[in-house]
Image (cartoon, rainbow, N blue to C red):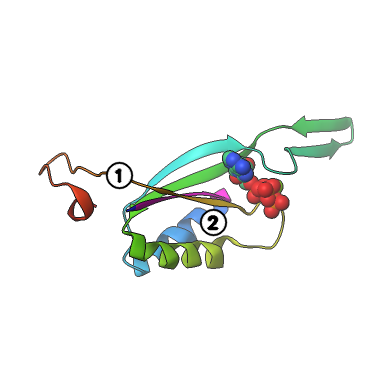
Amino acid sequence: MKKIEAIIRSEKLEDLREALDKQGLSAMTVTEVKGRGAQKGITLEWRVGEYRVEFIPKVKLEMVLEAKDVEKAVATILSICSTGKVGDGKIFISPIEEVIRIRTKEQGQSAL
Ligand SMILES: Nc1ncnc2c1ncn2[C@@H]1O[C@H](COP(=O)(O)OP(=O)(O)OP(=O)(O)O)[C@@H](O)[C@H]1O
Ligand SMILES: [Mg+2]
């Protein structure tokens, strides 16, 4: 099992959810986050001067899935969330040791 953590543009969330649903990937956790990447925030220019924003609001989507589904999920995220401009976000993939469904006490992939 793997965990995908995708930091995406907030406005992409609804389209991404729909596309993942169509792939049969529907279980996920979504969190509003703030972050910074290579450009370290942004500088906004106002008439009154410059205003520095160090952390930019994003959405973090977390999905734990069978390893065989990772490629499909990543392809879907890339196709929906890529605009080609800086700030499109990032995908982190890591191994998951165990999953337990609290209601039934099932463990492993059947608990996903
Ligand atoms: N190395 C990292 N570790 C943790 N979070 C990160 C990392 N890189 C990016 N993020 C998160 O992803 C968000 C979007 O990052 P962003 O897409 O700007 O990455 P980038 O490396 O600057 O790429 P780009 O040059 O395309 O903008 C950040 O606001 C931050 O929340
Ligand atoms: Mg960036």
Ligand 1 is located in which of the four quadrants?
top right
As helix, strand or loop, the secondary structure at mark 1 comes to loop
* In the foreground, 35 or 43: 35
Question: Height in image: 75 above or below 53?
Answer: below
- Can residue 110 be seen by looking at this rendering? yes
Q: Say which mark, if any, is on residue 97.
A: 1
What residue is at 36 percent from the left and 69 percent from the top? 22
At label 1, the amino acid type is Glu
Question: Height in image: 67 above or below 104?
Answer: below
The magenta stretch spans which residues?
A: 2-10
Residue 92 is one of the magenta-drawn residues: no
Question: Height in image: 40 above or below 62?
Answer: above
What residue is at 18 percent from the left and 55 percent from the top? 110
- Can residue 19 be seen by looking at this rendering? no
Q: Say which mark, if any, is on residue 27.
A: none
Residue 6 is one of the magenta-drawn residues: yes
Question: Height in image: 68 above or below 50?
Answer: below
The label nearer to you, 2 versus 1, is: 1
What residue is at 13 percent from the left and 47 percent from the top? 106
* In the foreground, 109 or 73: 109
As helix, strand or loop, the secondary structure at mark 2 comes to helix
Tell me if 54 is positioned left or right of 3 in this view. Answer: right
* In the foreground, 68 or 40: 68
Mark 1 surroundings: few (<14), some (14-19) or many (≥20) residues within 10 A: few
Q: N-terminal of the two: label 2 or label 1?
A: 2
Residue matched to label 2: 12
How far across and down, in percent of the image, does residue 51 sit? 81, 31
How far across and down, in percent of the image, does residue 87 sit? 67, 50
At label 2, the amino acid type is Lys
What residue is at 31 percent from the left and 66 percent from the top? 24
Residue 36 found in image quarter: top right
Mark 2 surroundings: few (<14), some (14-19) or many (≥20) residues within 10 A: some
